């Protein structure tokens, strides 16, 4: 705990005290830049710049500590948690995307317009069994599907290469069984791969497939719970972002590292 506090202190020391307070106020309350400018008696442009500086500092210092690249031992610990907490063996994480709503950026047409008839960017998150974020990808346009975003993400590309993710070797699901790969899980929107599982199609399910779908869906919902905790803790998610898309990306990444902190 002392070490964590030290890292957080270092993050905020990259900016002065007034800047750090302004940035924290924005993330925790979701107040507009105009209101923050009035409260702290500074210009709106200064608030925008301060938010970017604070979010950059948080990501720069905390990301290596709280969202590091997992080792094989880390993956095995995550798999053990999924087995003990959600009765799903050889699972390394649950993946899903969350729409982060924004005001329509200038001169972008329908690029950010999603199927919910709103403008957004997508936060794609891989969560462990305890609602901690393992990997994060931010900034894809809302009009793209989860599968498309997954294919273009660093995680999706690494998963195809396998070696770059340090995945553990296959292990049997029961004593004496054949070794099977460790997998990530998601909903029907994602592709079926050797190391990625999704539910069986809902038509013509037998009893075994129904049980499998139930277990997978129950384990997968942990990433939805992670999004829920993130939105409840950081009020900035409770209304559409009015700043530039590049700034929204930095804000979202900052809330992700603070979520894990």
Image: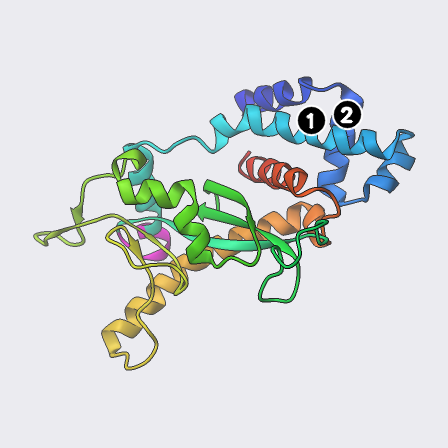
Residue 128 visible somewhere in the drawing: no
Q: Secondary structure at mark 1?
A: helix
Front position in the image: 13 or 84: 13
Quadrant location, the N terminus: top right
Q: Secondary structure at mark 2?
A: helix
- Indicate whether 44 appears above or below 241: above
Query: Badge 1 is on which residue?
Result: 53
Report the number of discs: 2
What residue span does the magenta drawing correspond to?
83-89
Among numbered discs 1 and 2, the one appearing first in the sequence: 2
Image location (x, y in percent) of residue 137: 49, 43
Judge left or right: residue 212 versus residue 5: left
Q: Is residue 132 magenta?
A: no
Query: Badge 2 is on which residue?
Result: 19
Do the CB atoms of the residues marked 1 and 2 lie less than 8 Å apart? Answer: yes
Alpha carbon separation for disc pair 1 and 2: 8 Å
Quadrant location, the C terminus: top right
Give the residue drawn at x 39%, y 32%: 69
């Amino acid at each position: 705990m002392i070490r964590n506090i030290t890292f957080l202190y270092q993050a905020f020391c990259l900016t002065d005290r007034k800047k750090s307070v302004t940035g924290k106020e924005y993330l925790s309350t979701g107040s507009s830049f105009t209101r923050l400018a009035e409260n702290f008696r500074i210009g709106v442009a200064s608030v925008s710049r301060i938010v970017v500086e604070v979010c950059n500092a948080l990501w720069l210092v905390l990301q290596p500590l709280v969202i590091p690249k997992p080792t094989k031992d880390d993956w095995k610990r995550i798999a053990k948690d999924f087995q003990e907490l959600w009765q799903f063996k050889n699972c390394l994480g649950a993946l899903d995307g969350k729409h982060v709503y924004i005001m329509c950026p200038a001169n972008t047409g329908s690029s950010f317009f999603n199927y919910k008839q709103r403008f957004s960017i997508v936060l794609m998150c891989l969560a462990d069994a305890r609602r901690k974020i393992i990997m994060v990808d931010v900034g894809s346009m809302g009009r793209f599907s989860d599968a498309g975003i997954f294919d273009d993400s660093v995680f999706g590309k690494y998963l195809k290469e396998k070696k770059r993710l340090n995945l553990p070797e296959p292990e049997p699901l029961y004593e004496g069984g054949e070794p099977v790969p460790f997998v990530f899980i998601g909903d029907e929107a994602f592709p079926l791969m050797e190391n990625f599982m999704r539910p069986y199609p809902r038509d013509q399910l037998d009893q075994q497939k129904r049980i499998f779908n139930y277990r997978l869906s129950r384990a997968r919902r942990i990433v939805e719970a992670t999004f829920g905790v993130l939105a409840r803790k950081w009020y900035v998610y409770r209304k559409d972002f009015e700043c530039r898309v590049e700034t929204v990306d930095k804000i979202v990444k900052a809330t992700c590292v603070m979520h894990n902190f």
